[in-house]
């Protein structure tokens, strides 16, 4: 058996394995420190070509330059106007300092101000606020890298008293999002790691055993970050990837080590010598970890099928850290266990037992719970299932959308600048609707249609559009760009509805000659296309994850009942999670408790993301529990006894592991970005439901009702390979308890 042989090899060659991991960690950390920053992007990019992406491609072709980001410096005063010499001088000085940054940071030809140009659109009504708009040099990632220099100019400006200087824009918002996300990682580490240690100490009863899974988790995280930094040189990863690696790495990395360490201590208590106990844990718990990791990775692969870089980046990050966690659990952990020997039980926790129970004779809390559930399986299913259905009901009110700049926490510089810009001008100056024309622009038909479009925009009944900029074209007059400011936050309904009118009403009604193709792009259009792609991806991701999970569980447990039941229970758990998300965020229950931000929508990427992640993690626990049940069933043939045995051997571990995941995920939910709050909170809720109601109540109750039918495999499938995760039991030999 591969995992048993690997565990024995790692234990017998402990120092070589440990040395190899030290080298791997050193290389990974060096790569991470050198390349990770350049591997991340705050830009959201399609990997296919919906309308918004086609528009972007045409703009880049027209300009011969990559799509750039717009920034706006805002200068305002409550006591002075632009006509005051001090105010005018402050604007002029600021413009000069921005020019001094040079063409590598700012496209200087785009930098304009009111004192030099007198352009009226640069001045707000009342003449007390003016803007200095400009475009960053290079592409989005270049702008993200260079925006700190621009922000420094703004922050170090020393205008006369009574004058305030602010900045907002796409790169500035991206910078602040990245900083808030990094702050979330710190919060997760600060709260999640100590909570994990406390729970592990309660599970194991010794400090050394408690610390070991945490050490393994961080080793996996650093290896995954190094690998992500390398991949990011070829495919830029969303900045969320660091958050997902830390979250999933702490959760899964601790869990995998927890189950193996627990099985090793159990085998030592049964009388096996050190190396044999490690090998036995390798042939049982490690094999379970391997197949659990495979199920998680398969579920995560569903995220790679969504044609959007945020999903692909999150999927890649999660897959990398799961693979690293499996590798560390199968190799590094046996080596460390071999080094520690009986030292695993050093530094006892006062008033807490060692956590090694007599599972053969039964008894205890978990045994009582399992037998209590199985005595009344129908009532248990009705009560637990009814509770989850009730929790899922609010999903009927689920509203999907996007959290824009206005959803960022108060005090964030980019948000403050955005609010002022939107109030006194239009935030759409930063993220305008970009209408791209492809075809013969040098025709009377197009010119007439263009005039009609401008008239429609100026007479828009909802006043959502600002004054358009002059039409830009390439030299061949085959590509044209009309930029039109859209009022408000690009993620708010006003802007979304405005883009919808453009695409589905104005443009089809006006451009009937066929001389040009019209594409609407820009940030709001991107959001709309992302929403559409997410909805269509559901029909790809859901069947893929469900189908692959069914096949793998059928192969592992040689049953069609086990995977069907697992899928149904997981769908119920996911539905309940969606419902609780609606209550916590849309209905404001979380805000009423003072812990979450009330928001009218759930981020569009959250449901699909949660489904992929949660299905993998839920299957994780299912494999752990069912493997012990199947192991016992192969020995005894007694279904009820096997279920009780599986619950009492894994109940404490699954609950502890679940609480660790909940602590980690909810720690990351403390970040002040709404999307990350919803992600962390949703993951924590789902794991809590899965580790308690589903695994402790619904699974044993359903297995009791089905009896031996749980293991039914149609005869025509007997040719399938036997991949069960638990090995046949071995008789223990007298232990020597050597170190």
Image (spheres, rainbow, N blue to C red):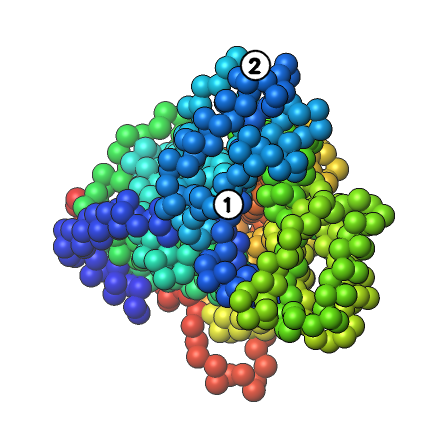
Tell me if 679 is positioned left or right of 555 in this view.
Answer: right
Q: Position of residue 391 (x, y in %)?
A: 73, 46
* Disc 2 to disc 1, C-alpha distance: 28 Å
Picture layout, residue 429 above or below residue 233: above
The C terminus lies in which quarter of the figure? Answer: top left
Name the quadrant containing residue 729: bottom left
Q: Position of residue 389 (x, y in %)?
A: 74, 51
The N terminus lies in which quarter of the figure? Answer: bottom left
* Residue linked to disc 1: 110
Residue occupying the point 67% across, 30% down: 124
* Residue linked to disc 2: 162
Name the quadrant containing residue 563: bottom right
Mark 1 element type: helix
Residue occupying the point 45% across, 59% down: 65
Picture layout, residue 119 above or below residue 373: above
Mark 2 element type: loop
Q: Position of residue 35 (x, y in %)?
A: 30, 50
Name the quadrant containing residue 473: bottom right
* Marked residue nearer the N-terminal end (2 or 1): 1
Picture layout, residue 130 above or below residue 334: above
Residue occupying the point 22% across, 51% down: 27
Q: Position of residue 83 (x, y in %)?
A: 61, 21
Choose mark 2 or mark 1, whichever is in front: 1
Local crowd size for mark 1, using a 10 Å CA cut-off: few (<14), some (14–19), many (≥20):
few
């Amino acid at each position: 058996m591969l995992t048993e042989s690997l565990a024995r090899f790692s234990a017998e060659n402990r120092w070589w394995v440990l040395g190899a991991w030290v080298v791997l960690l050193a290389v990974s950390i060096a790569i991470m420190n050198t390349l990770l920053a350049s591997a991340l992007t705050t830009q959201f990019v399609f990997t296919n070509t919906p309308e918004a992406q086609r528009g972007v491609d045409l703009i880049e072709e027209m300009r011969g330059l990559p799509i750039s980001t717009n920034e706006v410096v805002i200068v305002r005063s409550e006591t002075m106007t632009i006509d005051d010499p001090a105010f005018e001088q402050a604007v002029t000085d600021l413009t000069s300092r921005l020019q001094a940054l040079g063409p590598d940071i700012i496209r200087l030809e785009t930098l304009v101000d009111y004192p030099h140009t007198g352009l009226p659109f640069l001045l707000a009504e009342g003449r007390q606020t003016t803007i200095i708009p400009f475009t960053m040099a290079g592409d989005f990632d270049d702008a993200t890298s260079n925006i700190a220099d621009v922000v420094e100019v703004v922050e170090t400006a020393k205008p006369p008293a009574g004058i305030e200087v602010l900045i907002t824009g796409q790169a500035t918002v991206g910078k602040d999002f990245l900083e808030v996300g990094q702050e979330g990682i710190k919060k997760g580490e600060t709260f999640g790691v100590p909570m994990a240690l406390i729970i592990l100490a309660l599970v194991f009863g010794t400090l050394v055993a408690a610390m070991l899974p945490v050490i393994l988790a961080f080793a996996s995280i650093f290896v995954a970050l190094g690998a992500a930094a390398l991949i990011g040189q070829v495919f830029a990863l969303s900045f969320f990837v660091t958050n997902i690696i830390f979250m999933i790495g702490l959760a899964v990395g601790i869990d995998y080590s927890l189950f193996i360490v627990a099985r090793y201590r159990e085998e030592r208590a049964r009388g096996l010598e050190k190396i044999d106990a490690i090998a036995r844990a390798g042939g049982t718990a490690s094999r379970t970890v391997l197949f659990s990791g495979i199920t998680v990775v398969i579920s995560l692969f569903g995220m790679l099928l969504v044609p959007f870089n945020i999903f692909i980046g999150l999927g890649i990050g999660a897959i990398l850290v799961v693979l690293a966690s499996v590798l560390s659990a199968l190799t590094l952990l046996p080596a460390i266990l071999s080094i520690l020997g009986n030292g695993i039980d050093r530094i006892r926790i006062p008033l807490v037992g060692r956590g090694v129970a007599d599972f053969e004779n039964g008894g205890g809390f978990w045994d009582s719970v399992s037998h209590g559930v199985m005595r009344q399986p129908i009532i248990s299913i009705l009560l637990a299932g009814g509770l989850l259905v009730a929790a899922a009901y609010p999903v009927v009110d689920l509203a999907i959308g996007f959290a824009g700049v206005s959803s960022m926490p108060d005090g964030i510089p980019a948000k403050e600048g955005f609010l002022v810009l939107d109030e006194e001008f239009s935030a759409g100056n930063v993220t305008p609707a970009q209408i791209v024309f492809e075809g013969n622009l040098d025709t009377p038909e197009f010119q007439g249609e263009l005039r009609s479009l401008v008239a429609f925009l100026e007479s828009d009944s909802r006043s959502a559009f600002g004054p358009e900029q002059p039409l830009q074209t390439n030299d061949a007059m085959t590509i044209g760009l009309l930029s039109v400011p859209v009022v408000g936050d690009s993620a708010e309904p006003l802007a979304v509805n405005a883009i919808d009118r453009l695409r589905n009403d104005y443009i089809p009604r006006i451009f009937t000659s066929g001389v040009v193709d019209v594409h609407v792009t820009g940030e709001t259009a991107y959001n709309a296309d992302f929403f559409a792609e997410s909805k269509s991806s559901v029909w790809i991701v859901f069947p893929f994850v469900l189908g692959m999970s069914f096949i793998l569980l059928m192969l592992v447990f040689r049953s069609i009942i086990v995977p069907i039941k697992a899928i149904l229970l997981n769908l119920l758990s996911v539905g309940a999670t969606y419902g609780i998300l609606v209550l916590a965020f849309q209905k404001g229950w979380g805000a009423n408790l003072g812990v979450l931000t009330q928001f009218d929508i759930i981020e569009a990427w959250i449901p699909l993301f949660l489904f992929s992640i949660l299905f993998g993690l839920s299957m994780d626990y299912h494999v752990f529990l069912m493997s012990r049940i199947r192991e016992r069933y192969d020995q005894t043939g007694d279904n009820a006894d096997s279920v009780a045995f599986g619950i009492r051997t894994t109940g404490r571990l699954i609950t502890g592991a679940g609480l660790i995941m909940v602590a980690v995920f909810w720690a990351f939910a403390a970040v002040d970005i709404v999307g990350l709050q919803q992600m962390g909170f949703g993951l924590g809720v789902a794991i809590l439901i899965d580790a308690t109601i589903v695994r402790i109540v619904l699974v044993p109750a359903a297995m009791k009702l089905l009896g031996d039918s749980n293991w039914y495999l149609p005869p025509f499938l007997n040719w399938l390979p036997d991949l069960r995760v638990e090995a046949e039991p071995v008789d223990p030999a007298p232990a020597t308890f050597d170190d």
